[in-house]
Image (cartoon, grey):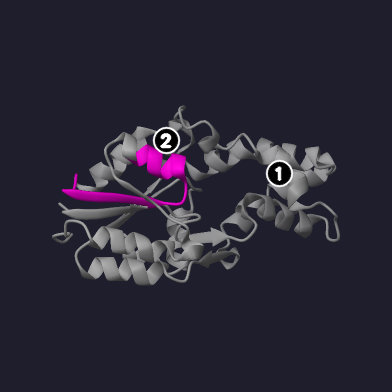
Amino acid sequence: MAEGVVLWDFDGTLAFRDGMWRGCLVDALTEIVPGHTVTAADLAPGLRDGFPWHSPETGHPGLSAPDEWWGALLPLFVGAYVRAGVDEDMATRSAQLVRVHYTDPGYWTVFPDSAAVLGELAEVGWCHIIVSNHVPELGALLRDLGLDEHFTAVVNSSLVGWEKPHRRIFEVALEQAGHPEHVWMVGDNPVADIGGAQAVGIPGILVNPGQDGLRMAARRILSGPPALGC
């Protein structure tokens, strides 16, 4: 059983995808319709609702298989394209490429302090677990970005069937961690990450990685009770 565990959000906390989902849809459309004039802002209205994390109060255990998870999102992507003025046929073809573009590690950037902070905390006994609202391929993405070696487990909403801030995903994380004596949640979203963790008794640290946030989180963790090892 781990005595000290840090639960980490992934997207926006340890790494980010340039352009996020809107940018991803633009990239997919460009592959099908080179020279189009659709922008990320044009696609934004159609993506404001419809992802599983937009209704975290409702579980989705039936979407725990990757193909099923992505298949459920195809209508959302097609609708966003059509709303932005894209022909329906081109919209459908582009939507089918979103998965490839979103999971391509070449579009992802790890924040400069991520690996160093994870390593420094591990050196003094803290174990790390990812708790993320993400796509089914998150594990492979962590590997491709060189981050997987830092984590003892990955609790991924698309595979668990519950999205942050629902208490169930945090309960799964605590189960995976072996109900540690000391635990923190670190993330960039005050509702999904911090509010969700605090609702089950886990103290949270809200971070802005672009402003030395990960370093400040590490200092706060290190100023508390020490971890006793994984």
Residue at 24% in and 54% down: 5
Q: State the residue at coordinates (85%, 42%).
A: 87
What is the distance, in whole Å, between disc 2 and disc 1 at their CAs?
A: 24 Å
Name the element at disc 2: loop
Q: Earlier in the sequence, mark 2 or mark 1?
A: 1
Question: What is the x, y in percent for residue 29?
Answer: 76, 53
The secondary structure type at the circle numbered 1 is: helix
Label 2 sits on residue: 162
Which of the 4 quarters of the picture holds residue 3? bottom left
Left or right, residue 181 beside residue 198: left
Rendered location of residue 113, percent (x, y)? 42, 70
- How dense is the environment of label 1, judged by Cα within 10 Å: few (below 14), some, or many (20 and up)? some
Left or right of 5? Residue 94 is: right
Looking at numbered disc 1 in the image, what kind of residue is underneath it?
Ala
- The answer, for residue 158, to whether it is visible in the render is no
* Image coords of residue 36 (percent x, y): 85, 56
86 up-or-down from 222: above or below: above
Q: Name the side, left or right, on which 174 lies relative to 211.
A: left
Give the number of the disc on residue 44: 1
Residue 128 seen anywhere in this rendered image of the structure: yes
Question: Residue 172, relative to residue 220: is it above or below?
Answer: above
Number of numbered discs overlaid on the protein picture: 2
Amino acid at the residue labelled 2: Trp
Give the percent coordinates (x, y) of residue 41: 75, 48
The residue under the point 78% across, 58% down is: 30
Neighbour tally class for label 2: few under 14, some 14-19, many 20 plus, Cα within 10 Å: many
- Identify the image quadrant of residue 27: bottom right
Locate the C terminus and report the quarter of the image it occupies. bottom left
Magenta region: 179-197
